[in-house]
Image (cartoon, coloured by chain):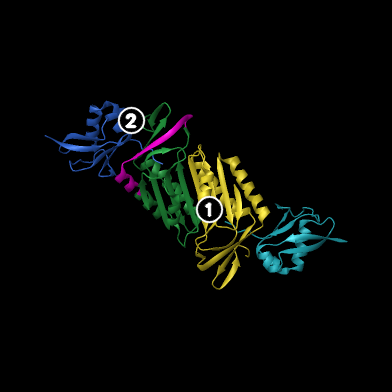
Chain colours: A cyan, B blue, C yellow, D green
Amino acid sequence: MTQPHTVLLFGITRDLVGQSRLSVPLTKGSRVSDLVAHLNAQYPALTGVKSILVAVNSEYAEPNTLLDPSDEIALIPPVSGG
Amino acid sequence: MTQPHTVLLFGITRDLVGQSRLSVPLTKGSRVSDLVAHLNAQYPALTGVKSILVAVNSEYAEPNTLLDPSDEIALIPPVSGG
Amino acid sequence: MIALTADPIDFSSAYHYLQTDEAGAIDFFFGVVRNNTQQRSVNQLDYEAYGPMAIREMQKIADQACERWPILKYVVIHRTGVLRIGEMAVLIGVATPHRDAAFEATRYIIDTIKQTVPIWKKELFADGEVWVNATP
Amino acid sequence: MIALTADPIDFSSAYHYLQTDEAGAIDFFFGVVRNNTQQRSVNQLDYEAYGPMAIREMQKIADQACERWPILKYVVIHRTGVLRIGEMAVLIGVATPHRDAAFEATRYIIDTIKQTVPIWKKELFADGEVWVNATP
């Protein structure tokens, strides 16, 4: 059984996916690395991005961070502010 | 025979001498070091300043720079701009 | 003060905000949209931010700077949206008693912003567009 | 642009002067009158300059900076006369394509100004006055 997880997209990742927000079905106990694998499989264009980090509730997360459906999850492609 | 040389004073040197401009009699062929010796003798308080450089025509001069009565000479106590 | 804004950055109010009687030095850095990058002619830049996280990351950087240097006041403002050449994309201002700390802290803040804050810029050329730094 | 002025420094016009399409980075340094020095409470500062030579020395420093860094535009303004706490005594602004040069050149200019430009400041305390750095 999967649960929907909301993922926010910005910059190049939004352009490649064509949406600024995705609902990603993940099984309970999924981690950041599972989300990334899921998205890379579903949107192979994402693998062309130099690097993609994941933020959970506005903080950079580790690959093994556990995800909860209530989390605000965001993909963070290479930043270029300033 | 001496010639009058005009010397401009600023900051602490002006306060110590009590004038912003001096006419200093120097013999022909006098150098910056001669001027300094003359002023130190006449105004001993100047020797209490940390260091005094001499500018000739708005450029820092060396002790052996020759002085001419037409030069604009200035004493430069330690600067503290900024 | 930390801000993200879609409006032009008002550096005059930033300057007044920084003033304090103990300040002997104020350093300001302005990142400005310039007309070219790697020999290509830029028309404008489009800045996008993940707002809440960007604010949070900028605040962390400012807090780190305040731990390392005796900062009296600081201001960090980043612009979002489409900017034309000459417009200010980012303003960093730091007031300290002496100048070494002002220079070092300002530089630390802008350098770190460019590494960690979730803001992205797209360069718009006459013949296309590209997300800066996004692809190898 | 190099200037000595008895009037308040207008940093807004300095900023506009620095703008140029090739500039990606602008660094500004402001030296401000602060309310204390070595634990003593300062009321105001009195800046005196040997004007023609001060302009010349500031121009030399700016020229040296332009040789060392790719400076697009610069502005160096030093105030003279009696300044109260919070007033700006000196403004340095440098516009360059990239930020490293802007920071380095600005710092070089202010550091060197403090070493060679014939400007003197007197600190006015509640109980006296002293020419800064003049006596051992």
Q: Image point 56% across, 64% down: which residue?
A: C45
Per the image, is D53 magenta? Answer: yes
Place of residue A40 in the rendered image (x, y in percent of width and height, measured from the top left) = 74, 65
Secondary element at tag 1: loop
Residues at marks 1 and 2, CA–CA distance in whole angstroms: 46 Å
Residue B39 x, y percent position in the rendering: 24, 31
Mark 1, Cα crowd under 10 Å, few <14 / some 14-19 / many 20+, is few
Relative to C53, D76 lies left or right: left
Q: Which residue is mark 2?
A: B49
Q: In the rendered view, does D31 fall on the left or right side of A6?
A: left
Task: Determine the residue positioned at 54% across, 72% down.
Answer: C126
Residue D112: % across, % down: 40, 44
Q: Which residues are magenta?
A: D37-58
Q: Residue at x 16, y 36 (%)?
A: B4
- The circle on residue C10 is 1
Q: Are marks 1 and 2 on the same chain?
A: no
Image quarter where the C terminus of chain A lies is bottom right
Please, what is the three-letter code of the amino acid marked with disc 2? Answer: Val
Question: Is any part of residue C104 visible from this angle?
Answer: no
Asked if C64 appears above or below C41 in the picture, the reply is: above
| SS at badge 2 | loop
Query: What residue is shown at x 64% (from left), y 51% (from top)?
Result: C55
Q: What is the chain letter for disc 1?
A: C
Asked if one can make out residue A70 in the rendered structure from this viewpoint, the answer is yes
Tell whether position B46 is magenta: no
What's the amino acid at mark 1? Asp
Where residue C39 appears, as percent x and y from the top left, is 50, 67
Nearer the observer, C32 or B53? C32
Looking at the image, residue A41 sits to the left or right of residue B39; the answer is right
Q: Nearer the viewer, mark 1 or mark 2?
A: 1
